[in-house]
Image (cartoon, coloured by chain):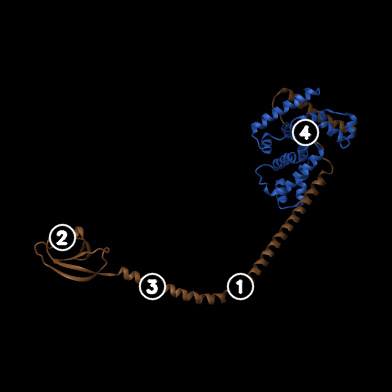
Amino acid sequence: MEERDLILRCQSRDENAFESLISTYEAKIYNLCFYTLKNREDAMDATQEASIKIYRYINSFRGNSSISTWIYRITYNTCMDYIKKRKINIVSYEEVVNVEDNISSKVEAIVEKKELKDKIKECILKLNSEHRTIILLRDINGLSYQEIADILNIEMGTVKSRISRAREALKNELVKIGIKGGG
Amino acid sequence: MSLLKLALKGGASMEIQQYLERLNEDKEFEGGLLSGLCEETPQELHNNIIRSVEYDGRAKKERMKKLLKSVAAVFILVFALSTARGFLEIGGSAKKTAENVVLSGANQKQDSQEKQSVISQDSTMDEKNLSKKTVRTYKIYTSNNEAVNFLNLNAKVIDEGTYAVDISFEEAFRKLAGNNQSYFESTELLENLPDDREYFIVEVEK
């Protein structure tokens, strides 16, 4: 109810309302951009582009799906356009970590240079774009099959099979770096 | 501080451990177990988003202004051109009026000539159409049914009881007058004959 009110205010071009809405979703937008583009700078640019699109087209949101699904869909399409337009060179996660080392928590780096979650993240980023996106939406963001189907504009059966294949691919990558079930 | 951090890390690791176990089971399982892998958003992200949205809004307003200015300029240009054209047309129409007066006189003359010519052509046609021919007619007094039947089949009806037949005088007598041989010969002006051939005009009296 509160979110609906927020959307209505956004649709009447209330900038404060838009700021509240974007505060709620900016982390999710950024994460989808990051896992799709595998680059923090590109993720930042794409997040801004997606946010502008959300602001521009918020009036076209009719409430047929949830606002989060709508925002995810815009973000995913923005990332796809971003890849097509800029033909970005998707760098490996090692490069990202090396460049961005200073930004990430130094304390964590001191305690354990490469902890488990970083290794898993590295493995996810090695997957192809399709698998990366679906792992993010399902396993990181915890979206339902239906929400994922709406965002990616695919059938629910396709979502299930894609998740299964993506997890299989992730398992193979984890095995490669010596991580097996049970840690 | 470091203890809190380690505790948080421990919580995240529990979920990750669970995820890895489920991954090996080759079964469907719930989503969201890797929520600990969410990337931290850069601090400047929020401000950048708001700035870019504001900038986009301003840019849109500027574009609208430019568009409106262009439309206004085009409108003014069109209005100015049409006004100038209107003035030219007014000047031109005055000139045309004078020309028209001269022309109309000439035209009237030409028209009347044309009309006369048409009338004369019409009268010729009328004369032609209404031309009467001097035709030798024979009035046959007969009650002979055979003669009437013959006329009905072969002759052209000119009027009630009057026929035009394209046959010879002798034949007409033989077929029409029969034994009576009673006829009256005259010369009359007859009109609306079928064509220019010479006809034997027969009037039948019962």
Tell which circle, 4 or 1, labels the residue nearer the N-terminal end: 4
Picture coordinates of residue A183 (x, y %)? 80, 23
Q: How many marks?
A: 4
Residue displayed at 17% across by 71% down: B186
Check disc 1 and give the amino acid type: Gly
Q: Check the picture and name the quadrant holding the N terminus of chain B.
A: top right
- For badge 2, the amino acid type reads Glu
In the foreground, A119 or B160: B160
Chain designation of label 2: B
The residues tagged by marks 4 and 1 sit, at their Cα atoms, a distance apart of 83 Å
* Pointer 3 residue: B119
Give the residue at mark 4: B35
Subunit bearing disc 1:
B
Q: Say whether mark 4 and mark 3 are on the same chain.
A: yes
Q: Are marks 2 and 4 on the same chain?
A: yes
The 10 Å Cα crowd at callout 1, few under 14, some 14 to 19, many 20 or more, is few
From what the image shows, is residue B62 above or below residue A33? below
Residue B152 is situated, as x and y percent measured from the top left of the image, at 19, 59
Residue behind mark 2: B171
